Image (cartoon, rainbow, N blue to C red):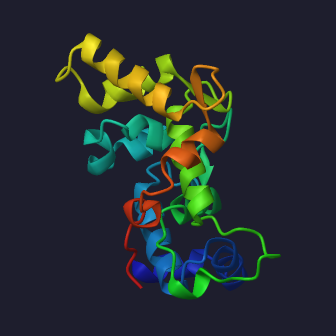
Amino acid sequence: MGSRASTLLREEEIEEIKKETGFSHSQITRLYSRFTSLDKGENGTLSREDFQRIPELAINPLGDRIINAFFPEGEDQVNFRGFMRTLAHFRPIEDNEKNKDAAASEPLNSRTNKLLFAFRLYDLDRDDKISRDELLQVLRMMVGVNISDDQLGSIADRTIQEADQNGDNSISFNEFIKVLEKVDVEQKMSIRFLH
């Protein structure tokens, strides 16, 4: 079964994905094997339903938001390369990546790209800002009925009050970055992928 993954994935595709995502050859072939096991339609793409069968996402209060992050606007299927690009946001930053050439494009797992990924989980209408309503919706997804609407409203108001620097009653990406500047995003948004 493991050999199936490497035979369907051409060596040049693996090399391109390595360059684009920073994953190792063995990580790519292992993730391809996982991708094909999730691909119930056996058509080389994953649907939202395929992702919803992953138990960890099914029980995650933000599971739907995370699943949506895999799909470009208006798309309902994701191919292996798109799958890998999204997973790359969660790849830990290695010490040798921290001082890379500034002229090179920023890796998908950079602090800025990790923060942008997180920001988009909150920016439900994709207007490049997080409104009070969006913050409330995400907070409600995360805590369910464990906190009253008044308490949630108070949390949302306080969060926006602390983050909003330009007085528009929303949180822009730059304001989001500023609020999280002391948070170890690199560690909190990393999954250890086996080598």
Relative placement, left or right, of 105 versus 166 is right
Q: Is residue 13 above or below residue 133?
A: below
On the rendered image, what quadrant is the C terminus found in? bottom left
Q: Is residue 32 visible?
A: yes
Q: Residue 67, percent across and down?
A: 47, 42
Q: Is residue 84 above or below residue 57?
A: below
Q: Residue 37, percent across and down?
A: 40, 61
Q: Out of 162 and 86, give the one closest to the viewer.
A: 162
- Residue under the point 55% across and 27% down: 124
Q: Is residue 145 above or below residue 8?
A: above
Q: Residue 48, percent across and down?
A: 48, 39
On the rendered image, what quadrant is the N terminus found in? bottom left
Q: Residue furthest top?
A: 150
Q: Out of 191 and 28, give the one closest to the viewer.
A: 191
> Count of labels shown?
0
Q: Is residue 110 above or below residue 116?
A: below
Q: Residue 139, percent across and down?
A: 35, 28
Q: Out of 46 and 19, give the one closest to the viewer.
A: 19
Q: Residue furthest bottom?
A: 96
